[in-house]
Image (cartoon, grey):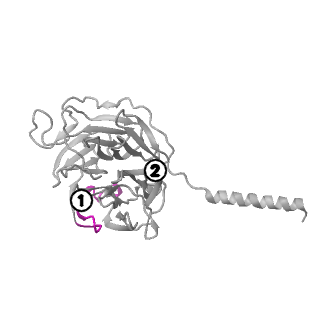
Amino acid sequence: MNRRNFLATTAAAATAATLKAASAATVTPYGETGVPLGSTEPLPLGPLPGSRYPDSHLESMKKPKVSFGPAGFPAFAGTMAVERIATGMRWAEGPVYFPAGRYVLFSDIPNNRIMRLCEDDDHLSVYRQPSMNSNGNTIDREGRLITCEHSGRRVTRTELDGSITIIADKYNGKKLNSPNDAAVASDGSIWFTDPVYGIGGYYEGIKAEPEQEKHNVYRADPRSGEIKVVVDDFVEPNGIAFSPDEKKLYVIDTGFTDGPDNPSHIRVFDADVGSGKVSNSKVFAEMPKPSITDGIRADTAGRIWCSVGWGDPSEDGVRCHTPEGELLGKIHIPETVANLCFGGQQRNRLYICGSSSLYAVYTSVQGALKP
């Protein structure tokens, strides 16, 4: 073989090898590209249309009502009204408040991004894109972001230097389904839910077959990295939160989305954070089908605040329950509500993710210190 033929053959082989390597490296894009919604004039930013003091969007279950605000319902804070503070999302989810920066982060799942709203001037910007179709977010004791990712099929932690640590992406050597929501206990353990919503199609993640036989609630140990199943009998485990003393664990089951005979409720367990075990499961609150609740948070008195949507429009919004499960009142929002969190410097402002928008309302209570 002469030198010219040798070089030509070598070049052809190198080109083939390069193409083969490039082909092997090709991956599916993680979710939709950012396509924000346009202006929606019927719902401008600011107090909702028709708002006055006291705001009629607050409804107390206590009768009769007193003349000044809804009696017995701690959403009332005096001169306040439900406000729409940001819009343009496809499906807003998973809000979390960062007191050090005075901003709220929340997911826009189909647009594959995490948004940031600065509290001081309501400036809205993109915090992270792509976000691996992030869903639920929370904050740990060190002020780090904990995120559940649909297309990543994992739970991650954003370190203080901006790097990302994978907390959990497999159990028993198989991929998780699509982690949905998380809660961090005082010992640093991360408890999270794993339904299949994020792998059911290409709108909020990447369609795939589930590898886990069940839809579990898990606990990730921060020191050993061990992932263990906490509860394995949910149809579709969704929102998750601890009571302020961490003696109770609340987990939402949105199984109704999979069939009319499945649950649409909140379950409560006795929790032992140290051992990572729960017991004495019971239904805490039923939702009015076809509505479901998706997100859940506690205030310092142990009251439980949860989202409502997907059913009767008159039920869209937020519900507040006593620690015993009694319904205290409702906050009516003109969109299906997915999730919520307490924020503000005094933790007395409730941030509400409602479909295309972020809402906020001042309350007369404070959110629990523990996220």
Q: Quadrant of residue 256?
A: bottom left
Label 1 amino acid? Glu
Residue 246 in percent (x, y) is at 24, 59
User: In what element is the residue under mark 2?
Assistant: loop
Q: Earlier in the sequence, mark 1 or mark 2?
A: 2
Can you identify the residue that label 2 sits on? 161
Q: Quadrant of residue 51?
A: top left
Q: Nearer the viewer, residue 289 or 233?
A: 233
Residue at 34 percent across and 34 percent down: it is 120
Can you identify the residue that label 1 sits on? 246
Are there few (<14), some (14-19), or many (20+) residues within 10 Å of tag 2?
A: few
Are there few (<14), some (14-19), or many (20+) residues within 10 Å of tag 1?
A: some
Residue 358 in percent (x, y) is at 35, 39
Residue at 51 percent across and 51 percent down: it is 30
Q: Using the image, determine if residue 169 lies above or below residue 358.
A: below
Q: Residue furthest bottom?
A: 172
User: In what element is the residue under mark 1?
Assistant: loop
Q: Is residue 8 magenta?
A: no
Q: Which residues are magenta?
A: 257-279
Label 2 amino acid? Asp
Q: Is residue 271 magenta?
A: yes
Q: Alpha carbon of mark 1 to alpha carbon of mark 2: how far?
A: 30 Å
